[in-house]
Image (cartoon, rainbow, N blue to C red):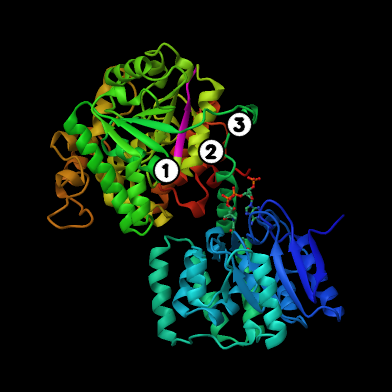
Amino acid sequence: MTSPVTVSIADGVALVTIDNPPVNALSQAVRQGIEDAVNAIDADQNVDAAVLTCAGRTFVAGADIKEFGQPPQQPYLPDVLSTVEASRVPWVAAINGSALGGGLELAMSCHARIAAPGAKMGLPEVNLGLVPGAGGNIRLPRLVPLETAITMVTTGKPIGANDALENGLIDRIAEDDLVADARAYAADLIQSGKPTPVSERPPKETPEKEFWSDREKALAAKSRGQASPVEALQALRDGIELPVPEAAEAERDRFLRLRGSEQAAALRYMFFAERNTGRPDDMRDVEPLPLKRTGVVGGGTMGAGIATAMLLAGLRVDLAERDADAAENARDRVAGLLDGSRKRGLLSDAAYTDALSRFTAHESFEGLAECDLVIEAVFEDMAVKKDVFSELDRICRKDAVLASNTSYLDINEMARATGDPTRVLGLHFFSPAHIMKLLELVRTDDVSPKALATGFALAKTLRKIPVLSGVCDGFIGNRIMSAYRRECDFILEEGALPHEVDAAMQGYGFAMGIYAVQDMSGLDIAWATRKRRAPTRPAEERYSRIADRICELGRFGRKTGSGWYAYPEGAKSGRPDPVVEQIILEESERLGIERKQLSSDEIIDRILSTMQAEARAVLDEGIALKPSDIDVTLVNGFGFPRHRGGPMFAAGYRD
Ligand code: 3H9
């Protein structure tokens, strides 16, 4: 078998090229190839320097994650990198695309680094439940300031070439031809001599004990039970405080221990699950409609968010409202959201102006006539939505795809309001639509493969994670969420209070509990849905009246100053409210339930088993195609802790 690592020599410089598509991961063959390359170069007296480069669109994106479920195979990466660092000649890493994880560790084991202007560098191991495992904790704090090192290892966020240069992670940025500039750099080093290997340099800073313990405490409080951020901080501290050979041994032990952990297995599973939600195999060859002009109906929170998401992805957007005032408000809302992205530093002034110039708010549907795809985001009412669809059917191009952003309603019924149901599908965004990654793609009964393929293409353009769902009340996510929310209300009737349920969920790793979430998003829409369903609800079905009684008092959550919790003036989070407690106690009594204390574990068990039972029904009915799609939905749309892998993973499901 030919090696994925090749060496070619010209003018005393060896060009070492890694070619292991798609992302040049450090598989066993690549590690072996690098080690062989060092040995060959060291033995060749005609070679005075080496340039390490990668074929394809990126530098090395890290260790091969697929190998993590198996026993480590020699040569081990830390040893290979020590060999590079100990090479007789200077090595220059030429970084294009992304240098991530083991890829950045490889670059740091070289004697100098030059990057393309668009390159990104990071240590994302923490997101896989790991810590850098090949000297990253030793070399990084010898190149960059301590704070930069801490941020990089504990958040996993990559930095761009300019930041990398400013922080000392790289030495040069290439001007036009990366490899040519790297060769020139190598020639300079032949003249000036090999720089001191990074692991032989002193750490940039060596803080006191208290510094580390304070940081550890703060990080643990933020990590919601995920172990890897604190482990990464500790590994970095070892890298700074211990002698290098001991630090390397401690890092390796920590890496291998974490690699075998349940959290790492869950995060790895999520990594692949999120990349496996795309088009089903039978749709691989279907051509989507090219998306040049997109349309949105409705400029409320969802409509404006969807328009913003599309503008941020470079699309042209026409938004239709019912009159001039509403159109003006929609324009302000979209401009406000774009401005928010600008203030967070995600959008330059020029990009902001460009995005806004691609946006038009119309005071009627006529402005949507030339769109390739239109998404309606109007009030959740079937009659209103059907009117919108028949109007769109009349005005839009006959080949345009029409989509609904409904979160619960029957899209088949909406499709039947058009003359051509094959062009109708659901595109269910999550709020805030320009930030949340999840997009439920709802397959209506008659939808054409082309319309569905267009939905997948849109998801790709927006860099969102598409999950295919069948039509049912609430689709995958909201249906499962409704089931466990109902169960939580039963838990209240049986003995717990809202803040105890929320504390149990946060203890498990949710960012927020179900009651705090409801207060944040408002209780009125779900109340309207319950009222809509009341006439068809089976009399024998268990039904909790607690939420209805809270809504009857006009308590619709934060926006009204009270809901499941009270929000006294200026309160950032809700306070348990005796009014709500009284309603709960009265309901228990009315139902003849003797209240009993429920532990956090019992509460979580009830929530998880309800989620899992509903998830199995969703699978059995063919609403979701596979268990991992359900996990991706719950993690990305409903705050299920990623390091737990999702309810199906927690139930023992593995891909
Ligand atoms: C590590 O390095 C540990 C070391 O410290 C110590 C070791 C001892 N391995 O995301 P995409 C696949 S931990 C295997 O769709 P993009 C991916 O599954 C590692 N496969 O593209 C997909 O396959 P498919 C630290 C990988 O352009 C295809 O490549 N590194 C790996 O949107 C394309 O991926 C990381 O955590 C991998 N490492 O984004 C980086 N990476 O086509 C993880 C990707 O069959 N990777 N694949 O579905 C990424 O963040 C993104 O993939 C990247 C490209 C930004 C590189």
Q: Position of residue 611 (x, y in %)?
A: 45, 38
Q: Within 10 angstroms of label 1, few (less than 14), some, or many (20 or more) residues?
A: some
| Beta carbon at label 3 within 8 Å of ligand 1 | no
Label 1 sits on a secondary structure element that is helix
Work out whether residue 331 can be spotted: yes
Residue drawn 39% across the image and 30% down it:
474
Q: Nearer the viewer, residue 135 or 185?
A: 185
Q: CA distance from mark 2 to mark 1?
A: 12 Å
Secondary structure beneath disc 2? helix
Q: Which quarter shows the C terminus? A: top right
Residue that mark 1 sits on: 637
Residues marked 2 and 1 touching at CB (< 8 Å): no
Q: Bounds of the magenta span?
A: 439-445
Q: Nearer the viewer, residue 70 or 419?
A: 419
Where 98 falls versus 199 (above or below)? above
The image quadrant that residue 274 belongs to is top right
Q: Which residue is mark 3?
A: 280
Amino acid marked by disc 2: Asp
- Image x and y of residue 205, in percent: 48, 86
Looking at the image, which is closer to me, 515 or 467? 467
- Disc 2: which residue: 629
Q: What residue is drawn where x is 54% and y is 60%?
A: 118
Can residue 106 be seen here? The reply is: no
Q: Earlier in the sequence, mark 2 or mark 1?
A: 2
